[in-house]
Amino acid sequence: MEQNLRKTFDGSLRQLKEQMLAMFTEVETAYKMMFKALEKMDNQSAQALIDNDKTINSLENTINETAYLIILKQCPVAKDLRLILTAIKIASDLERMADYATNCGMYILKTNRIEKAYNHEILKYKNYLLDMLSTIKKAYDENDVSVAYDVCDKDNRIDSLYRQQLEDFVEVAKTMTDEKAEEASRALLVIKQLERAGDHMTNIAEHIIYLIGGKLVELN
């Protein structure tokens, strides 16, 4: 009897992990869609990105429901409980990241013309963020602490890029004409969203490190 209960429990944990990996994949896809839309300032792709946010929200709800049902039915302890609680926290971070991608889609729809200079600056985040997404998904899938720590180093590059651009964009917003100032302000909002996406991936790295070793760390 006890063996059968454990088998059922393990099956529920595998289901939870599969749902988590599906959410990682959906968010990764959303960011690929976002950068593709930004490269061409394509309204159709931007709208598809916005519409896809419902799928990611639904995945978060499914993960939460699965996690809470496991807790109610199985009363897990120790590492099993960490796995479940960590899944809830990571899903929340992934959902916020998806919101940032959606906001960038809104930026595209509301931008009347392509401002190549700002677009070029925004696209500098592409390789950093996609690399981080791939890395953090691998860390979660393989329970790899060393890979999780790598994410922090990658986020430092995003922070450095953001600080440099922040000074430039604010200077434009303060000194240029109304139209130019508005363009700089709108672009500034976008890069802030992308910088925050990097912070959330660092949060996820912290959750993974806690999951594997029970150790609370602050990587930011």
Image: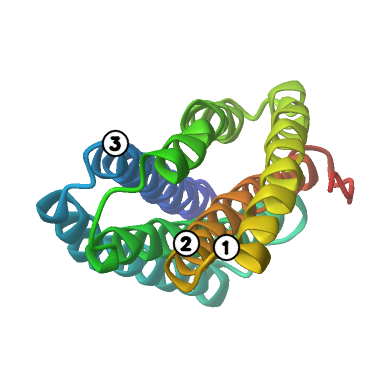
> Left or right of 67: which side holds 116?
left
**Earlier residue among tags 3 and 2:** 3
Q: Which type of secondary structure does the marked residue at label 2 adopt?
A: helix
Q: Which residue is mark 1?
A: 176
Residue at (23% x, 63% y) in the render: 112
Q: Position of residue 68 (x, y in %)?
A: 51, 74
What amino acid is found at the position of numbered circle 2 in the picture? Lys
Residue at (49% x, 46% y) in the render: 10
Nearer-the-camera pick, 69 or 126 = 126
Q: Which residue is mark 3?
A: 39
Query: In the rendered structure, are the residues bearing label 1 and label 3 in contact, judged by CB atoms less than 8 Å apart?
Result: no
What amino acid is found at the position of numbered circle 1 in the picture? Met
Q: CA distance from mark 1 to mark 3?
A: 25 Å
> Left or right of 106: which side holds 60?
right
Question: Nearer the observer, disc 1 or disc 3?
Answer: 1
Query: In the rendered structure, are the residues bearing label 3 and label 2 in contact, judged by CB atoms less than 8 Å apart?
Result: no
Mark 1, Cα crowd under 10 Å, few <14 / some 14-19 / many 20+, is: few
Q: Which type of secondary structure does the marked residue at label 3 adopt?
A: helix
Mark 2, Cα crowd under 10 Å, few <14 / some 14-19 / many 20+, is: some
Nearer-the-camera pick, 202 or 85 = 202
What amino acid is found at the position of numbered circle 3 in the picture? Glu
Q: Which residue is mark 2?
A: 180
- Up-down: is 85 above or below 9? below
Q: CA distance from mark 3 to mark 2?
A: 20 Å
